Image: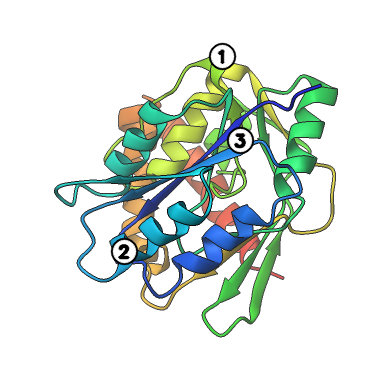
């Protein structure tokens, strides 16, 4: 029986130094039915030539060159519009996957009927040091997602029968996207594994390290996206802050 095709979305901007590792982690997947869509977001380094060379070596890799730099949300939307798969997964150009990641997730989705799936992952520093292991709950509802983003974007897969929700140009665009997909699906489930299936690089000076700005973004999501009242937003904000701390504890 043929395997369902998974479209892997990878935005890339000035990623020459590390994108090869991300692509190799897709090439190493034990699940063979995938296509990788790399959107070169008008890079000014050697990214364009490098990804073109990688695509020339494997016809499952497709490269789209953006004429102007439009940001990660636009790059992901461009890739999703060109995707041919029945499922979509995401991997940023500085992150990586365990070789069994797609196989385990697709098997789990088939066995459980889940339409949104995520997995445990490790947060690693630029020196390769383990910063923390993130083990999400076995399943999450929309209400639980409001309290904390339990879906690491590099681990998420969704079934396209749910429809493709666009990434919005807002702070925490990954969170807003998965919040909407869980709302559509009703719930999401985690691969039952204690082992990390993905590796998230925490770079020095990254946007995610700016705690105050991240908190402001989160507040706006509660008020403007989820349209919660002031009291409900405050309660959810407390939950979110606590969960953010726990994700950073090994």
Query: Are discs 3 and 2 less than 8 Å apart at CB?
Result: no
Q: How is the image coloured?
A: rainbow
Assess disc 2: are there few (<14), some (14-19) or many (≥20) residues with their C-alpha within 10 Å of its C-alpha.
Answer: few
For marks 3 and 2, the one nearer the N-term is: 2
- Residue drawn 71% across and 64% down? 133
The x and y percentages for residue 30 are 76, 48
State the separation of the CA atoms marked 2 and 1: 35 Å
The residue at 53%/50% (across/down) is: 58
**Which label sits on residue 49?**
2
The numbered mark at residue 90 is none
Residue 219 in the figure: left or right of residue 136: left
On the image, the x and y values in percent for residue 28 come to: 68, 57
What is the quadrant of residue 223 in the picture? Answer: top left
**Alpha-carbon span between mark 3 and mark 2:** 29 Å
In front: 189, or 28?
28
Circle 3: is it few (<14), some (14-19), or many (20+) Cα within 10 Å? many
3 vs 2, front mark: 2
Residue 123, x across and y down, in percent:
61, 67
Residue at 40%, 75% in the rendered image: 17
The secondary structure type at the circle numbered 3 is: strand
Residue under label 3: 157
| Mark 1 lies on residue | 161
Callout 2: SS:
helix
């Amino acid at each position: 029986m043929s395997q369902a095709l998974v479209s892997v979305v990878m935005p890339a901007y000035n990623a020459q130094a590390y994108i090869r590792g991300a692509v190799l982690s897709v090439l190493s997947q034990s699940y063979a039915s995938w296509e990788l869509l790399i959107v070169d977001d008008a890079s000014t380094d050697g990214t364009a030539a490098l990804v073109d060379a990688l695509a020339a070596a494997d016809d499952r890799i497709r490269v789209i060159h953006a004429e102007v730099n439009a940001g990660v949300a636009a790059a992901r939307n461009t890739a999703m519009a060109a995707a041919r798969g029945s499922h979509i997964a995401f991997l940023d150009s500085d992150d990586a996957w365990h070789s069994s990641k797609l196989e385990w997730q697709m098997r789990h989705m088939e066995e459980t009927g889940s339409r949104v799936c995520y997995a445990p992952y490790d947060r690693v520093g630029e020196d390769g040091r383990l910063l923390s292991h993130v083990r999400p709950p076995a399943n999450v509802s929309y209400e639980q997602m409001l309290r904390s983003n339990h879906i690491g974007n590099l681990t998420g897969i969704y079934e396209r029968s749910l429809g493709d929700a666009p990434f919005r140009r807002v702070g925490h665009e990954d969170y807003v996207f998965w919040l909407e997909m869980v709302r559509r699906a009703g719930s999401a489930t985690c691969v039952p594994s204690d082992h990390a299936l993905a590796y998230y690089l925490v770079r020095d000076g990254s946007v995610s390290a700016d705690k105050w700005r991240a908190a402001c973004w989160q507040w706006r999501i509660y008020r403007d996206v989820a349209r919660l009242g002031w009291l409900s937003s405050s309660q959810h904000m407390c939950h979110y802050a606590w969960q953010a701390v726990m994700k950073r504890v090994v």
